[in-house]
Image (spheres, helix red, strand yellow):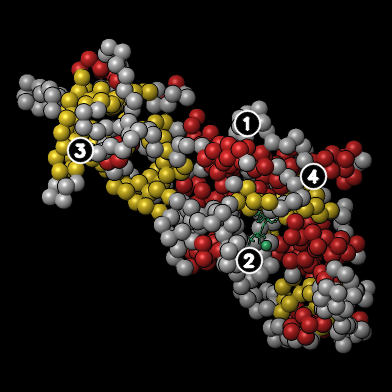
Amino acid sequence: MTDPTSASSTGPAGDFIRDLIRRDNEQGTFGGRVQTRFPPEPNGYLHIGHAKAICVDFGIAADFDGVCNLRLDDTNPDTEESEFGQAIAADIEWLGYTPPQPTRHASDYFEQLYVWAEHLVQEGLAYVDDQDPDAISAGRGGYGREGVESPHRNRPIEENLDLLRRMRAGEFADGSMVLRAKIDMNHENMQMRDPVMYRIRRGHHFRTGDEWVIYPTYDWAHGQSDAIEGVTHSLCTLEFDSHRPLYDWYLDHLPLPGDQPRQTEFARLELTHTVTSKRRLAQLVADGVVDGWDDPRMPTLRGLRRRGYPPKAIRDFCSYIGLTRTNSRHSIELLESFVRRELNVSSQRRMAVLRPLKLVLTNWPKDEAGEPVVEWFETVNNPENPDDGTRLVPFTGELWIERDDFALDPPPKFFRLSPGKEVRLRSAYFVTATDVVTDDAGEVVEVHATYDPASKGGNSPDGRKVKSTMHWVSARHAVPARVALYDRLFSAQVPGERTGDAFDDLNPNSVEILEAQAEPALAETEPGQVVQFERLGYFAHDPREPMLFHRTVGLRDEWANIQKRQAKG
Ligand code: ATP
Ligand code: MG
């Protein structure tokens, strides 16, 4: 079995897009220049799917000493905000890429687009259609059904020009007419059946204000913006495959300032148990299913960041899954294995008890003042990185241990603490349970035990073996921490597969908050820092709320288990 996260496996060697660019460069296409762009619409926050596109767009530009612009596709005044634009730029930086300044906007090109629209009108290649939207849509026909030409399709050029100018001047009501490209109403590709270029919409645009009442469609804006910026390779996801003939058609018919860019499509990233649609993510926020766009259960870059995902783990994952032209859904466990691999190296270890149960050592000594002795154990912060140094962890006669590390009636193969059994308290002592205190309901509220002074440091005094090593926290020194444990936000592997609605697969118990007790050093953790709680997983300190920790991932590599199961068939 190959470990996808090991340094020696860097994913598929090369990919079809890099191969294509290499060929372009050999043949001198675009003069050896490589320019890409990442074109999000500023109507929400970036998610893990966008991360793949960012790694592709910025990563390929970097590999070929090229340029990748961040271009906000701000062609819809109703849904877009500058707040989203700023967040997008910040998230790209966090992921590890620095777009050139300033951020480009499709709205920077509204005037040029308009000039080109008049050009197409003058060439007899665009016309104003004042049918209502339903009639336009019906006239398109469908697959195997011919389209019907609009009665306005053969308007004289001068009349089209006059109407277009008056559309721009605001003389007509919203939705009362559109500008359409005059291509082919019987084209086998629906995109080519006289697509709409401009619609009238009086919305306040966050950058151009009320300057425009006509707004370009995605298809009319995109390729032209690419050409204006000097993009050579316009990389996008497969759903734009059918738009490519239209992308080319517009560019073929315009007097471009330079090279004609070329569109190439690759597969979207989909993950199990995850939705990657901004609309659906926005709905999770609006419905209050999650606490916001940066809720640690969200697949947004903000959510993953708050959850403790290192950006490098996301980049390595994207590089490993590589580029293909077939849509597929990757296991979230694979992404998590990259996160775990990275955090294992970068995060310091701490001890915390999530569901505390009191353990009292009945033979623990007292000092001259009659107080229980305190011992400080020097403990390595990170066995993977000696530079992280050591810390002192206090140990006394009253400790917190994990509630489920003790069983009054242990089931078979329960190797942790139970009456008469001996275990190791990590780096401290061997202890043997002797007695319990129960409440009125019979619940164990306190465990009594004796410790073996000869086992100091957790070392076996006489070759005696114990089957379990447990974490613990000194009760007197403990600091309280709130700990959030997460389960999948969607319980189904493919949300929505059953009923067609992903929200039917929402997991009602995707978060559990616990009042934990932790060793004192946890209080010194920086906001945003990720530490490993011994035996429990990796936990990220919330950036805003002190002593709130989010479980990033557990310790067990579930991806390895999935692979074993798959190998067995
Ligand atoms: P959504 O469906 O979430 O609204 P979108 O495609 O409308 O996504 P845009 O802001 O238009 O979002 O996307 C910007 C870029 O990111 C596009 O080039 C798009 O192809 C790419 N992208 C979006 N989602 C994914 C994904 N799941 N995998 C790979 N690339 C993606
Ligand atoms: Mg989009």
Q: Is mark 4 within 8 Å of ligand 1?
A: no
Residue 170 visible in the shown view: no
The residue carrying mark 1 is 1
Tell me where residue 53 appears, x and y as whole percent: 68, 50
Picture coordinates of residue 236 (x, y %)? 74, 54
The type of residue carrying mark 3 is Lys
Going from the N terminus, do you reach mark 1 or mark 2 first?
1
Classify 10 Å Cα crowding around label 4: few (below 14), some (14-19), many (20 and above).
some
Q: Nearer the viewer, residue 371 or 252?
A: 371
Residue under pointer 2 = 207
Mark closer to the chain start, 2 or 3: 2
Three-letter amino acid code at disc 4? Ile
Residue named by callout 3: 358
Indicate the quadrant containing the C terminus: top left, top right, bottom left or bottom right: top right
- Please identify, in this view, whether the residue under mark 1 or under mark 3 is nearer the observer: 1
- Comparing marks 4 and 1, which lies closer to the viewer? 1
Give the residue number, with chain letter if any, for mark 4: 17
Give coordinates of residue 69: x percent, y percent: 71, 50
Say if 559 sits above or below 187 in the image.
above
Identity of the residue drawn at 49% across and 61% down: 506
Q: Which mark is residue 353?
A: none
C-alpha distance separating marks 1 and 2? 53 Å
Judged from the image, the secondary structure of the residue bearing numbered disc 4 is helix
